[in-house]
Image (tube, helix red, strand yellow):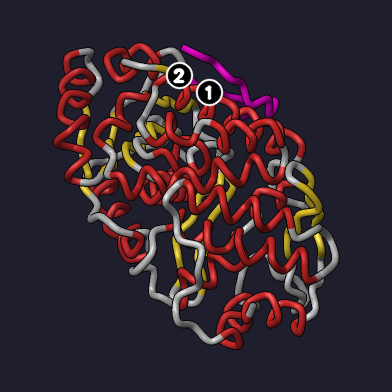
């Protein structure tokens, strides 16, 4: 098992990465919090796979535990679903000593974290991500949010978990599409920070796609370490943390314009990275070799690289509603080389249009 620490003073916590962690969840939880009661928030399918045993283990250990099941899909990450959860927490008389556990992918983690940040002005929560995307990205760093019809993650808070438990065994039951979608975020870390990780992905794609345990532990722990480093420097995304949004400006626009339905998040990010790399070339930030390598690796991992049938003008309009936009200036993370990026606070619309139409 690997332990990584995110050092944020009194909000510091550990990320535990390994196999068979769920078998000792009571221990890992009780090390950091002694809850008056536990509420497990998950999807029905995840509850059947892992939640029932966790509930049994917690109850046996003397921690009263209830379950809230949330429908699958990005549309559940909404204020409407949040209100339903608030109702249940009030019904069960949950207080500030209650603990929420997010058991699932990014939707569950973001939604649970948002509830934890806002219910009675804040209660503790723990992340147990079961998707690759959540393990390497959304479970780490304390970003919590729900979506608005006009923009992804527009309503949220920065709120850190007490601990993150990443059990590699949960990836064995992850649908292949979701697994590949998670690889988009791993590729992102290579592009923005670690050329060595990017080369590892290029040369070990077959191992990774065949779910080799050692390869998965390496890419997950490396990704988490990169994110921990970024979050420690800029917890609340005042500037530097924006590097983690490489590919997301276009990706979020694609998700919003397709109603969060036809593509999963990682697929949208994969497309966003391809076009952000093209924009980087158009803007004179990198050579043609950089978008070629990025596109080639994304294709090798079985992810989409082409925009759906959307009007570039509509995409730009959607980007203006992105939370990273400031003073009606569209901010982009542009790549100079693999492992080296630049935050550009204003990119001219004609350049964006050229990249989108290329």
List x then y, in percent, for residue 41: 29, 42
* Residue at the (57%, 79%) spot, across then down: 318
Q: Residue furthest right?
A: 284
Residue that badge 1 annotates? 218
- Quadrant occupied by the C terminus: bottom right
Q: Is residue 314 visible?
A: yes
Q: Nearer the viewer, residue 253 or 15?
A: 253
* Residue at the (39%, 15%) spot, across then down: 28
The reply to whether the magenta stretch includes residue 78 is no
Q: Quadrant of residue 34?
A: top left
In this image, 91 relative to 243: left or right? left
Residue that badge 2 annotates? 214
* Residue at the (57%, 31%) spot, across then down: 224
In this image, 348 relative to 205: left or right? right
Circle 2 SS class = helix
* Residue at the (58%, 63%) spot, across then down: 272
Q: Nearer the viewer, residue 236 or 281?
A: 281
Q: Which residues are magenta?
A: 1-17
The reply to whether the magenta stretch includes residue 15 is yes
List x then y, in percent, for residue 6: 63, 26
Callout 2 touching callout 1 (CB < 8 Å): yes
Circle 1 SS class = helix
List x then y, in percent, for residue 92: 22, 42
């Amino acid at each position: 098992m690997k332990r990584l620490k995110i050092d944020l003073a009194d909000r510091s916590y550990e990320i535990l990465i390994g196999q068979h962690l769920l078998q000792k969840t009571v221990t890992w939880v009780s090390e950091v919090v002694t809850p008056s009661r536990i509420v497990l928030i998950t999807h029905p399918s995840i509850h059947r796979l892992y939640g029932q045993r966790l509930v049994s283990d917690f109850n046996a250990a003397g921690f009263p535990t209830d379950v809230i099941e949330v429908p699958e899909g990005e549309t559940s990450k909404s204020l409407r679903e949040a209100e339903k959860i608030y109702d249940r927490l009030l019904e069960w008389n949950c207080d500030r000593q209650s603990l929420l556990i997010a058991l699932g992918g990014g939707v569950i983690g973001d939604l649970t974290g948002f509830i934890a940040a806002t219910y009675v002005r804040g209660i503790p929560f723990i992340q147990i991500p079961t998707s690759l995307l959540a393990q390497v990205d959304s479970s780490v760093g304390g970003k919590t949010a729900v979506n608005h019809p006009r923009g992804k993650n527009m309503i949220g808070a920065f709120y850190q978990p007490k601990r993150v438990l990443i059990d590699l065994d949960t990836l064995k039951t992850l649908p292949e599409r979701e697994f590949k979608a998670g690889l988009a975020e791993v590729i992102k870390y290579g592009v923005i920070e670690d050329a060595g990780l990017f080369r590892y992905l290029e040369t070990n794609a077959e191992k990774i796609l065949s779910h080799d345990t050692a390869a998965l532990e390496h890419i997950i722990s490396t990704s988490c370490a990169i994110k921990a480093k970024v979050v420690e420097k800029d917890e609340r995304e005042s500037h530097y943390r924006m590097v983690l949004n490489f590919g997301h400006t276009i990706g979020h626009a694609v998700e919003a314009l397709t109603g969060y339905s036809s593509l999963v998040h990682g697929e949208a990010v994969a497309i966003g990275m391809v076009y952000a790399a093209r924009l980087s070339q158009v803007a004179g930030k990198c050579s043609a070799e950089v978008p070629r390598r990025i596109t080639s690796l994304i294709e090798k991992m079985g992810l989409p690289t082409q925009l759906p049938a959307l009007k570039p003008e509509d995409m730009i309009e959607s980007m203006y509603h992105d939370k990273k936009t400031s003073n009606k200036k569209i901010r982009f993370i542009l790549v100079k080389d693999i492992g080296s990026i630049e935050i550009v606070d204003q990119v001219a619309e004609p350049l964006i249009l050229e990249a989108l139409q290329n």
